[in-house]
Image (cartoon, grey):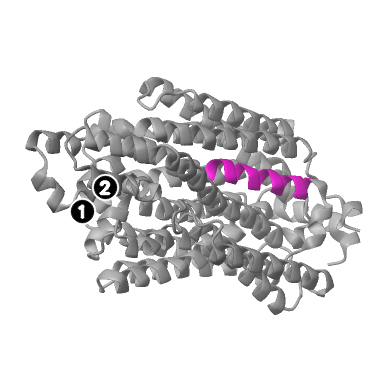
């Protein structure tokens, strides 16, 4: 469609919407909400179910040789989602958003079946799960790339904020509900974590096939194979480098300066530069670079990326804080902490659920800028408040800050999305939605890599001395204490994250038989490790929270620069 007809298309589109069945927009909202909820519950339930999954496939996640499988089960879904979502949004523009969305439901559901039928054990089973999770990520990306575009097509402009608010809050709430659901299902059988998606996915697939209608404007174009391939390779190399950067390297606590990581990231950057040059010359580019001429689209995506970086890795940090320190200090055994961590994080979900639909609906009347900008400023304050809490905090204070943080990101997300989607012509909505989700998806693994690296660097400066001194003072031979304390800090973090008592796992049989039984009982108690690690952990966490606060402040500035987000043809020409 020529660009000078985009405004006319927008008007005719709204006229067409008024003639649709009054119920259709609610069908579109409820189905896309179900899809987003299913995809996000699945991704977060894995976090809690990982210990049960590794026990089920008979693989020790704390063995250094198995660390890479742990990383890829966690990060593989995110990486694939970041890489393919733009292409899938573009395919929606070309062949119909509902068709690609429906296919996503089917791929996601079939993948869940195969994941629940994993028959191998050990590393073979881990590889099976990693591969099928990546396939499942393709289905999830089909849903996420086209859901916002389907809603934008179905709702008139004055109601899109409300619709996006409901849809996005369901997606975000799913991340937290999955923490609880994963703990409950994993306690029954780890396969149920995957199998529970099957009836929901089957219902959504049939419902979408029967009820959803393609109302979007299609673009007649050829598939940009060269652009797709170079984008996938370049982004995959960078995100793989970020993922592996968490691992220790030689005497260093992280691998960021290792030849392998530097090669991955540098090569990825070079390939993305080549991709950018290809897209500038392509007749039908996959990545619609011209959309970045639209101020609202450009600054909206920058703000979305910054919000994703600020928030994405924080979930892991909060879970580790609860599971590794606070819950054990309050009498919870390490094997109970994954489920209770999800429960104690519910105030965050409550904040999202309250502010998301409300800010979306109000932004339809008052504009998106005050809510998106205000949400990021509130996020800045909430991260700062978390930095002032002690390791063994008062839960009422912690819950209030979490609730405020939920309010902040709930206030930001829907208005930000509406501004981005309203700023582009109807024939570009699939591409725009895919690009928007790509920036969000890139932010999450980047955030996890950065947050873990900052935390590990902070821990590595103080934990060896703190831990060795504490172990020696309770009867552990000096040579063994130094050996245990010199282990990679990321190992302690992941042990706490998975609900393991790290010291019980790390103390060898030889050491335990030479320690006074009273000392051994104290060292492996619920309180010793949390007390030992709390001061180093909080010093690292403060660095992470300061970084998140600064990121929110930049996100507030970008949100302020978005403007109103209406289609502006002059910016595209």
The front one of 93 and 521 is: 521
Q: Secondary structure at mark 2?
A: helix
Q: Please give left or right for residue 207 compared with residue 195 in the image.
A: right
The CA span between labels 1 and 2 is 7 Å
- Image location of residue 149, percent across then percent down: 65, 56
Q: What residue do we see at 38% from left, 36% from top? A: 321
Instruction: Report which quarter residue 289 is drawn in.
Output: bottom right
* Rendered image quadrant of residue 459: top left
Q: Position of residue 370 (x, y in %)?
A: 71, 30
Q: Name the residue located 31 percent from the left edge and 62 percent from the top edge.
A: 195
Q: Is residue 482 left or right of residue 379?
A: left
Residue 184's mark? Answer: 2
Q: Height in image: 79 above or below 23?
A: below
What residue lies at 87% left-to-right and 62% top-to-bottom?
3
Read off the magenta span: 296-312
Q: Nearer the viewer, residue 389 or 382?
A: 389
Residue furthest front as drawn = 479
> Quadrant of the image for the C terminus?
bottom right
Residue 307 falls within the magenta-colored stretch: yes
| Disc 1 to disc 2: CB gap under 8 Å | yes
Residue assigned mark 1: 188
Identify the element where label 1 is drawn.
helix
Queried whether the magenta region covers residue 168, the answer comes back as no
How crowded is the residue under tag 1: few (<14 C-alpha within 10 Å), some, or many (20+)?
Answer: few
Question: Where in the figure is residue 395, as x and y percent of width and height?
Answer: 36, 23
- Across and down, in percent, residue 382 comes to 54, 27
Up the image or down, 357 lies above or below 572; here it is above
Main SS of the magenta segment? helix
Which residue is depicted at the point 65% across and 65% down? 266
Q: Is residue 483 left or right of residue 235?
A: left
């Amino acid at each position: 469609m020529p660009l000078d007809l985009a405004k006319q298309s927008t008007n005719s589109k709204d006229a067409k919407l008024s003639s649709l069945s009054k119920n259709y927009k609610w069908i579109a909202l409820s189905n896309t909400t179900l899809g987003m909820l299913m995809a996000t519950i699945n991704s977060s339930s894995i976090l809690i179910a990982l210990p049960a999954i590794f026990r089920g496939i008979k693989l020790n996640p704390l063995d250094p040789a198995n660390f890479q499988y742990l990383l890829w089960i966690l990060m593989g879904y995110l990486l694939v989602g970041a890489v393919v979502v733009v292409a899938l949004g573009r395919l929606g523009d070309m062949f119909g958003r509902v068709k690609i969305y429906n296919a996503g439901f089917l791929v996601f559901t079939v993948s869940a079946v195969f994941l629940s039928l994993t028959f191998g054990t050990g590393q073979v089973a881990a590889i099976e799960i990693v591969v099928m999770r990546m396939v499942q990520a393709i289905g999830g990306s089909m849903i996420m790339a086209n859901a916002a575009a389907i809603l934008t097509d179905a709702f008139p402009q004055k109601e899109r904020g409300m619709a996006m608010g409901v849809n996005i809050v369901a997606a975000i709430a799913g991340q937290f509900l999955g923490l609880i659901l994963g703990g409950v299902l994993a306690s029954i059988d780890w396969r149920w974590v995957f199998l529970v998606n099957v009836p929901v996915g089957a219902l959504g697939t049939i419902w979408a096939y029967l009820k959803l209608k393609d109302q979007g404007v299609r673009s007649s174009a050829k598939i940009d194979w060269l652009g797709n391939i170079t984008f996938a390779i370049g982004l995959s190399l960078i995100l793989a480098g970020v993922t592996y950067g968490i691992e220790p390297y030689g005497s260093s606590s992280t691998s960021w300066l290792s030849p392998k990581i530097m090669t991955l990231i540098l090569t990825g950057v070079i390939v993305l530069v080549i991709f950018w040059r290809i897209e500038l010359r392509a007749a039908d580019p996959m990545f619609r670079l011209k959309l970045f001429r639209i101020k609202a689209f450009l600054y909206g995506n920058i703000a979305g990326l910054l919000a994703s970086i600020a928030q994405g890795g924080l979930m892991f940090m909060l879970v580790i804080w609860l599971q590794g320190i606070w819950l054990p200090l309050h009498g919870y055994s390490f094997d109970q902490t994954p489920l209770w961590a999800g429960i104690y994080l519910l105030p965050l979900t409550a904040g999202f659920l309250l502010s998301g639909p409300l800010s979306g609906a109000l932004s339809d009347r008052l504009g998106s800028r005050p809510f998106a900008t205000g949400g990021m400023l509130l996020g800045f304050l909430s991260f700062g408040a978390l930095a002032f809490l002690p390791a063994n905090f008062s839960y009422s204070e912690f819950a209030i800050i979490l609730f405020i943080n939920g309010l902040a990101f709930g206030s930001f997300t829907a208005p930000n999305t509406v501004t981005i989607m309203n700023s582009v012509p109807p024939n570009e909505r699939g591409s725009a939605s895919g690009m928007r989700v790509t920036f969000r998806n890139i932010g999450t693994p980047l955030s996890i890599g950065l947050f873990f690296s900052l935390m590990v660097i902070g821990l590595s400066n103080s934990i060896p001395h703190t831990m060795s001194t504490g172990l020696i003072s309770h009867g552990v031979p000096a040579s063994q204490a130094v050996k245990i304390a010199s282990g990679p800090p990321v190992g302690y973090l992941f042990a706490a994250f998975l609900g393991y008592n790290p010291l019980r796992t790390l103390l060898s049989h030889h050491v335990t038989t030479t320690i006074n039984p009273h000392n051994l009982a104290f060292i492996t108690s619920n309180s010793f490790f949390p007390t030992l690690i709390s001061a180093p952990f909080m010093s690292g966490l403060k660095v992470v929270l300061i970084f998140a606060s600064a990121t929110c402040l930049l996100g507030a500035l970008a949100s302020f620069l978005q403007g109103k987000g209406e289609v502006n043809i002059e910016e595209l020409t």
